[in-house]
């Protein structure tokens, strides 16, 4: 019955909204058209198109081709209300009228229900059975997703409430657009960036400074997310869920403790931006802000304080802590439309100050400790007894006074150069143009160390010449990681057009990491108002680094949506 | 403007403007041929009023050079009572497709078609900061 409740609510909601209108015009509640209602009802079923990698860290490990990995149901109810008319009728709003302040509010309620853990394979049901409370909390949500008031007068604008603020000019990957956290738990790299942003309770204001010499439309903007209001960061996908980051269960997840930022004023996000138009065709901005990265920063600690030369007998004292240190970012962006070629050029650069990284010598310091060697038979017995093998972490014996690690921090410079162009490809489409977009992303870690890694263990690696004689199993090697080089480079491309007067929209998006990873996202959407139908194939091929960590999770997603707007 | 279908006893084409007054004006006549080979229009000619650069009349051929369409429009010169504001209003447009034997008329602002704008404009809305008011 508990399972049916959300589904029943969804059906009732759908019936109510479908009954409201069958057209895609805005639905206004009042005669003066100041209060509008919109909605989006969406259901998406996603199927895995490859088996989980052998000896890999994608769970459940018996996931097969054709297995359902997502059945996500989403309802968004949107209300927009311009309060200007009400200022004449409601006495409480009289100050707004007197001060000539325009006011409106925007509200989005979100209802989400993931049915996978009830109707999916035995493996996914087992994930829920094993961690019922956590998964039940993860699979459904009822949120006041966005809710803010706008107050404006002349050059001033103040927006107060739960909102999304996206700066910068990049698509797919973020540089200056790092203010709101991303929810990567329901689609990860396969999901559109706009659908992943999580709103924050925020104060945001802007002021139009007007023209100054060759600079037009100069405007200044600032935001503040008081840490006592909201210190939310990107959520951590529970173990066994389809889009969790791959890592060994026993040796990592079982000793992993995630510490999100506490709600306190020192964890406030804040920032400012100056924008202007240069000449007639170039938009520019410079910005500085403080925020939190989406990926937490793990490091290993030893919970026991061990004097020099003391062996670590309790292996459970070795723990992995994930924290979210704040990061400050300084950068700028530009777009320029070149009229002769009809190309929009985009650029962005951002310096991340003291960005947390994973360097083995710092974050993994306990793993580098000396040890008192033990004979293989003793190690085999200990491993069979404890359920995990210390040799996986490089200890061929008892570790000697390992010391806690810390989070390494380096300055990182990132940049993007891109361009967009509309062009005709008449043999393929003689009625609509193709939109093409290309981006190059670069990254330079300053004062880079060679032991900088992505903290994700490479699957199917074993300690050489080591087999546990009791269990007969080879010993997995958890010290093989993808390295992060001093400079990294990614290219992205997107091409899309439309047929049948805009009803049929094919799209091809791709990304290529120079380290040898491809991400391919072909999709096709069909619109028959007020409905949307979509099919998206997602594939990752190549080496185990950056988005290649998800290389054994190719999938096909079918989406059906109803829009009231 | 009174069209044929609006005039009692009219025997001509129903789309024909019956009270449109043509006056002699200095004009440029531009001959234009699309560069895009997929564009359906061929050569077309446009009459441009020399003092105002307003385009009032156009003759369109298809790519084979066969006469296809005529476009014409009428403007009205408007003035406020206190003469503090003057502007040119687009009052009528007419496109006649000879191949389809079909015409389309578009009625703009005129003494018989009065438009009222309730929009409240603020110069600040047309700035980078102002656009954000209209963004989510």
Image (cartoon, rainbow, N blue to C red):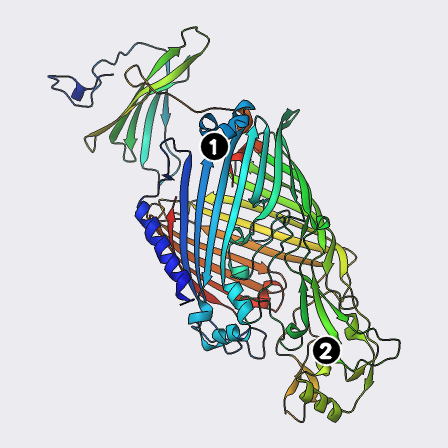
Q: Quickly name the residue at label 1.
A: A83
Left or right: residue B52 compared with residue B112: right
Tell me the crowding category of disc 1: few under 14, some 14 to 19, or many 20 or more residues within 10 angstroms, Cα based: some
Tell me the crowding category of disc 2: few under 14, some 14 to 19, or many 20 or more residues within 10 angstroms, Cα based: some
Q: Quadrant of the C terminus of chain A?
A: top left
- Whether residue A277 appears in this view of the structure is no
Mark linked to residue A277: none
| Of residues A497 and A265, the one drawn nearer to the viewer in this rendering | A265
- To which chain does the residue with label 2 belong? A
**N-term-proximal mark, 2 vs 1:** 1
| Of residues B22 and A72, the one drawn nearer to the viewer in this rendering | A72
- Residue A224 sits in which quadrant? top right
- Whether residue A437 appears in this view of the structure is yes
- To which chain does the residue with label 1 belong? A
Q: Position of residue A310 (x, y in %)?
A: 86, 80
Q: Position of residue A520 (x, y in %)?
A: 50, 61
Which residue is pictured at 50% across the width and 38% down the height?
A105
| Of residues A518 and A397, the one drawn nearer to the viewer in this rendering | A397
Q: Residue furthest right?
A: A308
Q: Position of residue B120 (x, y in %)?
A: 47, 24
Q: Position of residue A340 (x, y in %)?
A: 52, 35
Q: Secondary structure at mark 1?
A: loop
Q: Quickly name the residue at label 2.
A: A316
Q: Residue furthest top?
A: B82
Q: Is residue A359 above or below residue A350?
A: below
Q: Quadrant of the N terminus of chain A?
A: bottom left
Query: How far is the residue under mark 2 from the one under mark 1?
Result: 59 Å
Left or right: residue B73 compared with residue A371: left
């Amino acid at each position: 019955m508990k399972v049916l409740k959300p589904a029943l609510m969804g059906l009732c909601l759908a019936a109510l909204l479908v009954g409201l209108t069958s057209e895609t015009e805005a639905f206004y509640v009042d005669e003066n058209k100041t209060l509008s209602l919109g909605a989006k009802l969406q259901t998406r079923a996603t199927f895995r198109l490859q088996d989980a990698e052998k000896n890999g860290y994608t769970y459940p490990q018996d996931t097969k081709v054709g297995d359902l990995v997502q059945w996500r149901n989403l309802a968004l109810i949107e209300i927009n209300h311009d309060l200007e008319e009400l200022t004449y009728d409601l006495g409480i709003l009289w100050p707004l009228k007197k001060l000539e302040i325009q006011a409106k509010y925007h509200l989005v309620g979100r209802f989400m229900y993931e049915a996978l853990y009830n109707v999916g394979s035995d493996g996914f049901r087992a994930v829920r059975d094993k961690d019922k409370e956590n998964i039940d909390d993860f699979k459904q949500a009822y949120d006041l997703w966005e809710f803010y008031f706008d107050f404006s007068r002349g050059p001033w604008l103040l927006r107060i409430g739960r909102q999304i603020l996206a700066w910068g000019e990049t698509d797919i990957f973020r540089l200056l657009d790092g203010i709101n956290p991303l929810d990567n738990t329901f689609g990860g790299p396969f999901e559109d960036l706009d659908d992943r942003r999580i709103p924050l309770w925020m104060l945001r204001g802007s002021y139009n400074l007007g023209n100054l010499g060759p600079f037009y439309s100069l405007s200044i903007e600032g935001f503040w997310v008081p840490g006592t209001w909201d210190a939310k960061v990107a959520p951590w996908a529970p173990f066994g869920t389809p889009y969790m980051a791959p890592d060994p269960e026993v040796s990592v997840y079982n000793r992993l403790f995630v510490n999100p930022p506490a709600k306190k004023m020192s964890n406030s996000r804040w920032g400012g931006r100056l924008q202007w138009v240069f000449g007639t065709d170039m938009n520019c901005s410079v910005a500085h802000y403080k925020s939190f990265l989406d990926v937490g920063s793990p490091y290993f600690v030893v919970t026991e304080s061990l004097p020099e030369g003391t062996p670590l007998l309790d292996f459970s004292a070795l723990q992995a802590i994930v924290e979210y240190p704040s990061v400050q970012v300084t950068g700028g962006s530009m777009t320029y439309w070149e009229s002769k070629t009809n190309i929009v050029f985009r650029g962005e650069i951002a310096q991340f100050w003291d960005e947390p990284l994973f360097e083995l010598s710092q974050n993994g310091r306990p793993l580098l400790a000396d040890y008192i060697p033990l004979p293989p038979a003793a190690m085999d017995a200990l491993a069979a007894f404890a359920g995990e093998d210390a040799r996986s972490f490089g200890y061929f014996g008892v570790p000697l006074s390992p010391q806690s690690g810390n989070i390494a921090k380096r300055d990182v410079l990132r940049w993007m150069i891109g361009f967009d162009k509309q062009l005709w490809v008449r043999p393929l489409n003689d009625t609509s143009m193709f939109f093409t977009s290309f981006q190059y992303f670069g990254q330079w870690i300053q004062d880079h160390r060679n032991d900088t890694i992505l903290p994700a263990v490479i699957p199917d690696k074993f300690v050489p010449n080591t087999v546990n004689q009791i269990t007969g199993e080879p010993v997995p090697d958890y010290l093989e990681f993808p390295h992060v080089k001093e400079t990294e480079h990614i290219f992205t491309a997107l091409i899309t057009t439309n047929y049948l007067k805009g009803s049929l929209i094919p799209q091809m998006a791709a990304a290529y990491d120079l380290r040898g990873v491809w991400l391919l996202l072909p999709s096709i959407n069909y619109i028959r108002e007020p409905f949307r139908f979509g099919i998206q194939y997602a594939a990752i091929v190549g080496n185990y680094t950056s988005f290649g960590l998800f290389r054994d999770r190719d999938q096909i997603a079918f989406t059906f949506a109803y829009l009231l707007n | 403007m009174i069209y044929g279908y609006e005039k009692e006893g009219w025997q001509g084409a129903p789309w024909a403007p019956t009270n449109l007054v043509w006056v002699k004006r200095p004009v440029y006549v531009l001959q234009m041929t699309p560069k895009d080979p997929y564009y359906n229009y061929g050569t077309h000619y446009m009459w441009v009023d020399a003092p105002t650069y307003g385009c009032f009349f156009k003759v369109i051929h298809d790519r084979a050079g066969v006469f296809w369409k005529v476009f014409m429009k009428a403007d009205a010169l408007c003035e406020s009572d206190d003469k503090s504001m003057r502007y040119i209003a687009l009052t009528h447009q007419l496109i006649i497709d000879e191949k389809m034997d079909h015409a389309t008329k578009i009625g703009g602002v005129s003494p018989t078609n009065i438009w009222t704008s309730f929009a409240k404009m603020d110069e600040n809305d047309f700035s980078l900061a102002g656009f954000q008011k209209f963004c989510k």
